[in-house]
Image (tube, rainbow, N blue to C red):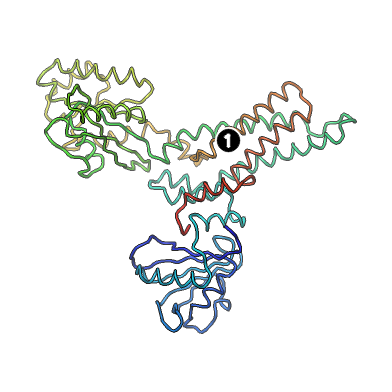
Amino acid sequence: MLLEETIVALATPSGSGAIAIIRISGPKSMDVVEGIFQSKSGKTLKEQDSHTLQLGNIIDEQKIIDEVLVSVFKGKRSYTGEPSVEISCHGSSFIQQQILQLLNRKGCRTAKPGEFTMRAFLNGKMDLSQAEAVADLIASDNEASHQIAMQQMRGGFADQLKELRQQLLDFASLIELELDFSEEDVEFANREQFQNLVTEIQKTLKQLIDSYAIGNVIKKGIPVAIVGEPNVGKSTLLNALLNEERAIVSNIAGTTRDTIEDELAIKGIGFRFIDTAGIRDTKDEIEGLGIKKTFEKIEQSQIVIKLFDASLVEKNKSHLEHIVKEINKIKTRFPNKPLIILANKADNVKKETQNFIKQELPKVEFISAKTKTGIEQLKDELVSYVDTGRLHNQDTIITNSRHYNSLQSALEEMNRVQDGLNAGLTGDLLAIDIRQALYHFGEITGEVTNDELLGNIFGNFCIGK
């Protein structure tokens, strides 16, 4: 991707709509658009001020393609940090293609995925962590993931790292200076102050690494498995949570032959609900595969909802023994997963039966998925299992696996520095580990990059961004 080339792409989703925006960026963007745009004011684009709109026509030789608005961004005062133009045309697919093809013929190259944001990074408009946050912001589908992406895009994470990196770099410079005066046996870097800095950096890195646990699930959505015997109302519960008929509901046992997944935002947190095939002994080969997948989904989930039919207990008290055994199996196999026990169809059982169930299962909650009784309380409980304290406190939360790996590597190097200080190592040996820690800091913000890394990051962006 050469910065001297002028690139073009559709910045709005493809297909017909009210309007479409075509983005052009590069050193010749003004000249290229000038050759196909006829302003109604009679002025050229170069005569206009930056960040202004001009009404006019896009013309292919003598043929008017569309009446458009052209936005002008001069010098480095653009998203990409280079001269840019945006054409707002009518949203006809035919008009979009006509303008794009015309721009290609005039010397613009079609942009690759993420190339506009990559140019913003290369031109110093944002660091690499901020550029990656742009993709997260576009992909955010709930309040929590949006909040984290916005914080990182504003540079909160990067600023925190840059400050620590600069302090470490300052001490590294003093230690390197000591090497030039090794024969005089002098210390320019105060070891006590350096020890305090190392401790502070270790603490900050650990906090950031620990935040990845919540950040990762918030970004992807917290997976919740709904498990239980066939026909206890798992699909009805899923529909009640989603407030729509997402899953097939039938009185025939084993209707759900595969897992059904859907997402829901509860108080700004994304949850992925998985309605699994019922767990029971079966000779049906297809249903058996669904049951096998159920245990796989429980393994992948963060929270498990065990649902059973309370009305069956009212008909046969011994049925509760079977339910308790199933619950104990889940607890034994997955002891660290939060388990919510729900007795469904509570509207069809007497108070006496509810008391009987509570004797064996003190933490059971009674609901009616059909009438949606207890659904709001269930949502509150689900949110309570997510540690949202850091989110509400505006703390930095890591969601990117690349950042997580680099932070882990940086912490390992800082631990080596700590061990070196404890052992009284000389400055030349300390400097080796400090350089490596600085390298991993730089990986995150982009001071250290390579073409393969940039290609992998920006290749996942949408075209036009």
Side (left or right) of 36 relative to 277? right
Quadrant of the image occupied by residue 160? top right
Report the residue marked by disc 1.
407
1 vs 328, nearest the viewer: 1
19 vs 290, nearest the viewer: 290
Query: How many numbered markers are drawn?
Result: 1
Q: Residue at x 32, y 25 (%)?
A: 339
- For residue 29, above or below residue 316: below
Q: Residue at x 58, y 70 (%)?
A: 28
194 vs 14, nearest the viewer: 14
Furthest residue toward right? 184
Label 1 secondary element? helix
Q: Residue at x 29, y 41 (%)?
A: 262
Q: Position of residue 65 (x, y in %)?
A: 40, 77
Q: Position of residue 96 (x, y in %)?
A: 40, 69
- For residue 100, above or below residue 274: below
Q: Residue at x 44, y 62 (%)?
A: 11
The quarter of the rendered structure image containing the N terminus is bottom right
Q: Position of residue 107 (x, y in %)?
A: 53, 70
Side (left or right) of 269 relative to 204? left
Q: Position of residue 29 (x, y in %)?
A: 55, 70
Circle 1 packing at 10 Å, graded few (<14), some (14-19), many (20+), is many
Q: Amino acid at mark 1?
A: Leu
- For residue 69, above or below residue 421: below
- For residue 127, above or below residue 98: above
Quadrant of the image occupied by residue 408? top right
